[in-house]
Each structure stands twice: as structure tokens, then as C-alpha cells.
Amino acid sequence: MATTATSIKRMFIDGKWCDADSGRTLGVINPATEEVLEEIAYGGRAETRRAVEAAQRAMPAWTKQTAWDRAKVLKKTADFMRQRCDAIARTLTLEQGKPLAESKAEILHSADTFEWFAEEGKRAYGQIIPNSAPGKRHLTLKHPVGVVGAISPWNFPITLQARKIAPALAAGCTIVCKPASQTPLSLVQVFECMIEASLPAGVANLVMGPAQEIADEFLENQICRKISFTGSTEVGKQLMRGAADQVKRVSLELGGHAPFIVFADADPEAVAKAAVIGKFRNNGQVCIAPSRFYIHADVHKRFTEAAVEFARALKLGNGLDAGTEVGPMFEKKAMEHTVQLVDDARQHGAKVLTGGKRSTRFERGYFFEPTVLANLSPSARIMTDEPFAPVMPLLDFSKIDDVIQAANNTRYGLAAYVFTNDLTITWRMAEGLEAGIIGINDPVPATPQCPFGGMKESGLGRELAHEGLEAYLETKYISLKLRD
Ligand code: NAP
């Protein structure tokens, strides 16, 4: 494989950049060119143990700081991220593939997350609770959970760590972060921002290496009190089982299979445009990506024609090139998985309205044509498995009860989208859908001050919002008996 690697990106443990004990490195691939971009230090269990121990040593002083002082580090981190947005975005596009504009949006959203939790940390309030017995007083205090192990996937390498680092640090916890092995480079740049923002040694650590080894250390080391994981439902379940032994706290942000439901009163062309933008953002490799499109029979034809036209017009290319709207998929395996999903849908009778294959316009890179499918059978894999692919399956419906039932007929419950201007339909859908995030006429609902997370097998707990801070706090109840 061709290489353009010039340097090694190191792990960050106890305030120092360091190599793997073994000297082992791993190449990070550019999905647009299939070249090695850079090597990373690839450690393992011993390095993770040192990072966890450093986080434990750093915790008393960090917890003792006031929330106002901790906020200064988080706010300065946000400032540095905004100042360096262009440089970090370039790295993110190179390692992940998404267009530069999407990379910039990810960095700015993540900077906002750091800033928002800097402020929310000041609101980790306890309560004074009215007493029932004379002479007693009851109150609660908030206490940081402890050292956190944070594992994240490759699709939003910065955002998904920011949603863990910022609230954990704001709450007075310390953290050891493990990014996806394929996309660690942009997070290294975020660590540089934290270091320049005067992050004390050991408060946030970065380890890279085989996932199982790092996770085993998080699970088996008594010092690590919480695991915050974003990734597949299968790995989330394994971690939940592993965490049971020491009753470790777990937050899980897992897979989704979001229904996108368009009622007859919606404008089919305008909604088709929003649907195409929402579906093909980051090539459909988004946990809240709409992935089953239920269109009311009255507007199905107009919606379909518009969606096919918009999808065909999307500009596929290297994310660094001006005008690119859809980049390569992030790895070869993901592209091959998409080929199989479309083949399986075809075998179950689906019709390909546009796309449906690897793009032949590129000599290298994992480019798949934005795809729209019709005539979906409920037994096609794409209807039950999380697709994580640039494929838009279109279905139709006539009755509200039927579409609610179809939308909820999945083990997932992360996001759902509804397009209507009818107030009664809006309420029935908001109350009837089993999803943690519901966008009504809103294809991009995520924002730092609102809760993000799933029902059913899509996860446990919420990130962002006040709930995202609470996830790093224990409630201590104090009962006080006064002298008579
Ligand atoms: P994945 O295989 O579960 O990997 C995610 C992370 O877990 C990576 O850092 C990976 O490390 C690590 N990992 C892999 N095997 C592990 C193990 N046995 N124990 C502990 N950690 C392990 O997920 P993916 O398929 O790459 O990512 C896509 C999934 O993430 C989708 O299901 C998507 O819906 C979900 N996701 C959810 C949200 C949300 O907020 N709900 C957001 C984004 C993505 P390596 O890279 O080193 O293998």
C-alpha cells in the first residue's frame, strides 16, 4: 500500500506524549486515496493501566478545583478548537472522508459542547428536601463518579469524544479516551487544544491500541468507575455484561434505524430535499441517519421523483475538493457491506431508482453512488439491520396507526423524523414513536443543550444537556439530626 506518512502521532498519558511500550505503530488510511496518512502509536493494556492510574492520581486536585476553575480549561479548549477549525477539519476529512464543510460543522458543534458543559458544570446542584420528622434535615450533594473510560467510533471522531470529555471534566471526573483505531488523528489535535488550555497532567489521557485489550483494562481495573461507550449495539452489550462484575456505571450510545415519515400535508419536494441531505450526510454513516422512508401514498410519487433527482445531483468526490457533497465511505469493509445490502434488497424484489453500485469514476477510494431503492420487502436485510450506508429505501403508507407500528417494529429506538403541519398528527407521532430523539420537520435535531440518546437496544442514558452532566455524577443523600 502507498504511504505518505511523515510522522507518528503519540498517545497522551499523565501529561506526556508517549509511544507504545513495544514500539508498535498502526497506519491510518485516507479513504479517498487508500494511502497511509500517518502512523499512530499503538499501545495496549499496560499503557491503558498507566493512563487509568494517572487519571486516579489527578482526580483529587481536579475535583477540589471549583466548577468555575474547571470551566476555564473547557472554555479555552473551545476557543482553541474554533481558532484551529480549518486545520483540524482538514485532518478529519483526510482520515474519515467526510466533506470539509461537514468536518468544520463537527468541530464547531464540538467546541460548543465544551463551552456548554463549562457552564453546566456550575449547575451541579444538590437539593434541600423537606423533613417529615421534627429535628431532621435532608439534603443531597453531587459527587463525581470517578475515573471514566471513554470509547468512541470513527463516524464523528471529535463530537463523540467531546460529548464524554466535556461533561466528565465539568463534573470533576478524570478520563481515559480511546478513539476508533481508524480515526484518531483529529482527536490528537483536540488534545493539543486541551493541553494549551492548561489541562493538568492526568486529567484527560489518550490511549490507542487494540479495542479488546483497552476495554478489558477499563472493565477489570477497580479504579475505573465508569465506561462511556458510543458504538455498535453488539459491543455495547458486551461492555454492559463485563461492567456487571464490578457494578461499573455505563452510558451506552448505540445503533439506530431511524424512520423518516412524510404525511400527505407536507410539501413533498421540499421534504425530499431535506431527506436527501439528511440521508447522505457522512454517507449515511450517522447513528441518527434516517434509514427507512415511509411516505404517505398521496405524495409518494412526487416525493420519489424529487428524491431521485436530488440524490442523482449530489457531487461525489474527495472531501477536500471544493463542491464535494458526498465523500468516500470510511473503509473498504463499509463499502463492501453496502454492496451486499443493495444486492440483498434486489434479491428481495427492490428496484434501484438511482445508484446501487460502487462508483466507477474513481481509480482509488471507497466511493459508493448515492442510492435510492423502491419496492422494499420487509424481509430485506436493510429493513431490519442498521444500514450505516448511503442507501435510501422508500416505502408508502396510508394510515397513521400502521406507520407508527411499522416505525416501532425494530429493536432500535434512537431517532425518528416526522414531516407534517397537522398538530394532532404531530402529537400522536411524538407520543407514539419509540425513539429517544424525534425531529418534527427538523432533520438535524442534535444540539448541546438537548438530550441525545436512545430507547430499546439503542442505548442507556443520555448525552448532552443536563442529563449528560448527571451521567458523571452520583447523588449523595445526607440526613442530619439536629440537637433537641
Ligand atoms: P464498534 O465496532 O462498536 O466500534 C466503536 C468503538 O468501539 C471503536 O473505538 C472500536 O475500536 C471499539 N471496539 C470494537 N470492539 C470492541 C470491543 N470488543 N470492546 C470494546 N471496544 C470495542 O462500532 P462501529 O461499527 O465502528 O461504529 C458504528 C456504530 O456506532 C453504529 O452502530 C452506530 O449507530 C453507532 N453510533 C452510535 C452513536 C450514538 O450516539 N448512539 C453515534 C455514532 C455511532 P477499534 O476502532 O479499535 O476497533
Image: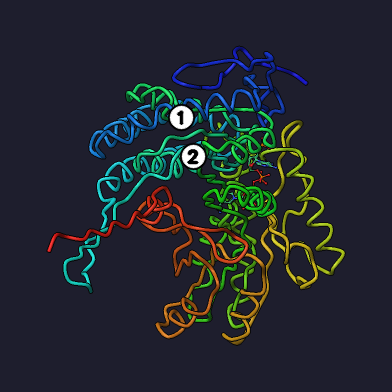
Q: Dot 2 lies on which element? A: strand
User: Can you give x and y, in whole percent of width and height, for residue 227 in the image?
Assistant: 54, 44
| Residue marked by disc 2 | 148
Q: Dot 1 lies on which element? A: helix
Tell me whether circle 1 and circle 2 mark residues in contact (CB < 8 Å).
yes
Tally of marks: 2
User: Can you give x and y, in whole percent of width and height, for residue 152 in the image?
Assistant: 57, 41
- Residue 481 vs residue 477: left or right? left
Quadrant for the N terminus in the image? top right
Residue at horizontal 72%, vertical 58%? 354
Instruction: Tell me where residue 457 sits by quadrant.
Output: bottom right
- Residue 159 vs residue 31: left or right? left
Decide: is 19 above or below 396.
above
Q: Can residue 301 be seen from the camera position used here?
A: no
Residue at horizontal 47%, vertical 83%? 428
- Mark 1 residue type: Ala
Ligand 1's image quarter is: top right
Observer-nearest of 250 and 131: 131
Residue at horizontal 65%, vertical 50%? 232
Residue at horizontal 64%, vertical 33%? 214
Other-residue count near label 1 (Cα within 10 Å), few / some / many at <14 / 14–19 / ≥20? many
Ligand 1 near label 2 (Cβ, under 8 Å)? no
Observer-nearest of 396 and 304: 396
Give me the disc on residue 55.
1
User: Can you give x and y, in whole percent of width and height, for residue 284 in the image?
Assistant: 62, 52
